[in-house]
Image (cartoon, rainbow, N blue to C red):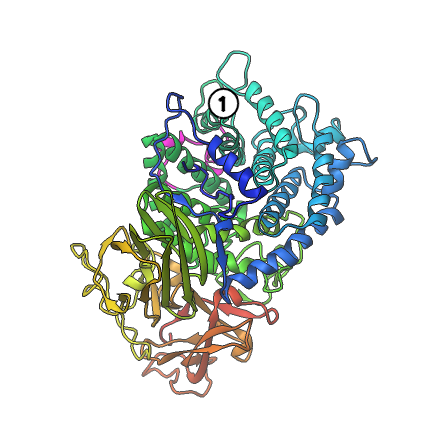
């Protein structure tokens, strides 16, 4: 048996939670004669409750999320009236609705984060507080299942975007978006605690929507303006075995971009300009779009619908080929929080919403589970370490909404400020972080039949069921700072299976699975060594095509076959077997496709999975005039004393001077170049910028004096 949900929560350990989740797992398998055939790839994620992290990079961040961010977000929801809205809608408190009409969704996301926290760290006080909140939510729900606190509290004075009556302005009302997050939270709460209190609220809501929307004459044909309910319905289907929820999700997908029976289409901003199965490019609001693509990937995986699968692959290729920032961020434009045109990737005005980075990770994980290809994990990893992680401060209580790749330290890019903010009027990003962070451990491993996949390299251990037997795998590594990984494989008894180790694209000389970015073939002067180069299309062996990467089993070098980005080791594993993988981490210079106007003549720096930037605080306040020649020597040095412990890149660059300044080059007629002077250059991981005050920052540097 296996769950079709890509982030299952049942732990490997026994006990109440284990028994609850085992019941859930058994119930989630549909009988073979039901209409929705089980046609998945067979890949399933190993749940985070079966994985224990013991590293110095992610584990402290997970602890900060548990100890700081969960409680902080909950308190902010209370301070800003988000919690009180449910109490008011329940008739237990007087007063008007507070905040924005979609604020209910923020509460649901925090509940989901609390549920994940309780699944791993029981906390009776936190659980009791959650029970009281859920009681208010249940009381706020109207008798027929409708749940939208602003309309219940003040039905005659709703905000304009809500529409005068139920479902009357779905393009903007977020009525269906809100309850989509409710469904996700309800399933997580049920799985974590075994309590059905919130699940019953979700079921009543979904049943109302199922009665209201559909193809029958007495039903409404329309779709949500902000996608999310589709994801929630799929999760609710998986928890309840009710095919009507999956069918309703498909109804919303199939009627997007379809005019028949609808008053109007909403257009490309809402991905409602053509049927989803005919779409090929990522358009409109980035978060809405990627939530749609997640649902399409889920539906393709669950139903075997090839039209969904092909469409979502086309859109993915469009993103990674023309609309992906080096950090993995997506959504170029502040205006409308939207994708730009192909190759429109400005740096200082980049939007790159943190919510979009989270959606990007979830989407690429779904794509991997559907196809088993490591290129999706390459994008996931890039986004995880860079585009997502920059969104939250090391302290866990300050946030970026947008994540630009350049800043002058003055322009208030972050919703009115140029530093991380403790909260926003629209705080979708802080509450999305709190539910996403605990799920990161579920990206690390996956299984299929007799194969165990190692997707990410994080120190710790996982207890995994494979072919009805138990295998414990332990990782020792200082990734992402170092590329040496030691894995100890401990099956309960000798067992034949295939171990598949992801060889990251960056280690194979390919930063992204497209031609959008490439590595400078030989980073001149780098003490980290020249690039190993890309394997030829015909090469299937790890060596000698990738000579700098070494792989050993029990101390003996092996040359495994490469399949879909994974090194494949087939053998009968004995308890205590060890695998050693060494992924060299040279400092690499990255060039953007010439079609990316903002990056022409510029270079960026990477080491391992990390993108680097330069900050003004390390360069006399200015970085906009820094130049990094191709021949400049760059070295990596670990700084445990800086920004929670980071590896910095150091070298000699140039500082362009004002015209007429004194330097190594002049602005004479002979050279035509601006004067410059040597400068010591220090680059830090992009995720860690802006922790030392507002100031200039840049990811892309000029390669030569202009």
Numbered range of the magenta stretch: 262-281
The C terminus appears in which quarter of the rendering?
A: bottom left
Find residue 63 and report its image quarter: bottom right
Where is residue 480 shown, x and y percent of the image? 43, 66
Observer-nearest of 563 and 196:
196
Secondary structure state at the residue bearing disc 1: helix
Observer-nearest of 371 and 226:
371
| Label 1: how many Cα within 10 Å (few below 14, some 14–19, many 20+) | some
The residue drawn where x is 61% and y is 70% is 693
Mark count: 1
Residue extending farthest to the left is 538
Identify the residue position indicated by label 1 in the image.
244
Q: Say whether residue 345 is visible.
A: no
Find residue 18 and report its image quarter: top right
Q: Is residue 171 magenta?
A: no
Where is residue 562 shown, x and y percent of the image? 23, 55
The N terminus appears in which quarter of the rendering?
A: top left
Helix, strand or loop: magenta stretch: loop
Relative to 183, residue 581 above or below: below
Relative to 360, residue 258 above or below: above
Q: Is residue 268 left or right of residue 531?
A: right
Observer-nearest of 324 and 702:
324
Relative to 30, residue 320 above or below: below
Where is residue 504 shown, x and y percent of the image? 33, 59
Residue extending farthest to the front is 493
């Amino acid at each position: 048996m296996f769950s079709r949900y890509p982030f299952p929560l049942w732990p490997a350990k026994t006990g109440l939670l284990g028994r609850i989740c085992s019941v859930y797992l058994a119930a989630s398998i549909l009988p073979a004669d039901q209409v929705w055939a089980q046609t998945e790839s067979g890949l399933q994620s190993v749940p985070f409750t079966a994985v224990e992290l013991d590293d110095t990079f992610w584990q402290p961040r997970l602890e900060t999320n548990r100890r700081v961010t969960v409680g902080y977000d909950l308190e902010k929801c209370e301070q800003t009236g988000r919690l009180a809205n449910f109490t008011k809608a329940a008739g237990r408190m007087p007063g008007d609705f507070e905040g924005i009409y979609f604020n209910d969704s923020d509460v649901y996301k925090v509940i989901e984060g609390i549920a994940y926290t309780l699944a791993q760290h029981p906390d009776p006080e936190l659980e009791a507080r959650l029970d009281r909140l859920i009681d208010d939510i249940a009381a706020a729900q109207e008798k027929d299942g409708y749940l939208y606190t602003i309309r219940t509290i003040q039905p005659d004075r709703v905000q304009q975007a809500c529409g005068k009556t139920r479902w009357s302005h779905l393009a903007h009302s977020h009525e269906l978006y809100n309850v989509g997050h409710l469904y996700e939270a309800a399933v997580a709460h049920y799985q974590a605690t075994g309590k059905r209190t919130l699940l019953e609220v979700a079921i009543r809501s979904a049943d109302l929507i199922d009665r209201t929307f559909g193809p029958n004459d007495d039903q409404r044909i329309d779709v949500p303006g902000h996608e999310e309910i589709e994801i929630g319905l799929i999760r609710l289907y998986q928890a309840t075995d009710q095919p009507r929820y999956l069918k309703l999700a498909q109804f919303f997908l199939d009627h997007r971009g379809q005019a028949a029976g609808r008053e109007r289409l909403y257009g490309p901003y809402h991905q409602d300009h053509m049927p989803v199965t005919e779409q090929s490019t990522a358009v409109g609001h980035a978060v809405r779009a990627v939530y749609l693509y997640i649902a399409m990937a889920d539906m393709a995986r669950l139903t075997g619908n090839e039209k969904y699968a092909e469409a979502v692959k086309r859109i993915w290729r469009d993103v990674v080929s023309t609309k992906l920032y080096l950090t993995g961020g997506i959504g170029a434009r502040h205006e409308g929080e939207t994708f730009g045109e192909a190759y429109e990737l400005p740096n200082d005005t980049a939007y790159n919403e943190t919510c979009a980075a989270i959606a990007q990770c979830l989407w690429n994980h779904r794509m991997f589970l559907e196809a088993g290809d490591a290129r999706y994990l390459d994008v996931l990893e890039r986004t995880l370490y860079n585009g997502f992680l920059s969104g939250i401060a090391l302290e866990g209580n300050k946030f970026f909404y947008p994540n630009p790749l350049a800043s002058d330290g003055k322009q208030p890019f972050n919703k009115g400020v140029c530093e991380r903010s403790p909260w926003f009027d629209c705080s979708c990003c802080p509450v999305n972080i709190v539910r996403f962070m605990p799920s990161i451990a579920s990206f690390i491993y996956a299984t299929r039949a007799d194969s165990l996949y190692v997707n990410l390299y994080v120190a710790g251990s996982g207890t995994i069921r494979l072919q009805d037997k138990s295998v414990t795998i332990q990782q020792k590594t200082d990734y992402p700072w170092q590329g040496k990984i030691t894995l100890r494989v401990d099956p309960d008894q000798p067992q034949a299976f295939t171990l598949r180790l992801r060889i990251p694209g960056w280690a194979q000389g390919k930063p992204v699975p497209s031609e959008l970015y490439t590595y400078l073939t030989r980073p001149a002067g780098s003490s980290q060594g020249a690039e190993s180069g890309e394997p030829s299309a015909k090469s299937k062996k790890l060596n000698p095509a990738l000579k700098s990467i070494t792989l050993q089993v029990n101390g003996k070098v092996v040359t495994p076959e490469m399949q879909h980005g994974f090194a494949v080791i087939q053998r009968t594993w004995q308890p205590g077997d060890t695998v050693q993988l060494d992924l060299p981490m040279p400092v690499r210079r990255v060039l953007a496709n010439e079609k990316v106007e903002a990056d022409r003549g510029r270079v960026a720096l990477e080491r391992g999975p990390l993108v680097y930037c330069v900050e003004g605080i390390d360069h006399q306040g200015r970085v906009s005039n820094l130049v990094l020649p191709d021949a400049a020597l760059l070295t990596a040095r670990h700084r445990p004393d800086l920004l929670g412990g980071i590896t910095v890149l150091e070298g000699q660059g140039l500082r362009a001077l004002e015209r007429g300044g004194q330097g190594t080059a002049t602005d004479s007629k002979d050279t035509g170049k601006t004067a410059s002077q040597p400068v010591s250059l220090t680059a830090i991981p992009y995720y860690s910028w802006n922790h030392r005050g507002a100031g200039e920052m840049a990811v892309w540097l000029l390669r030569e004096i202009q």
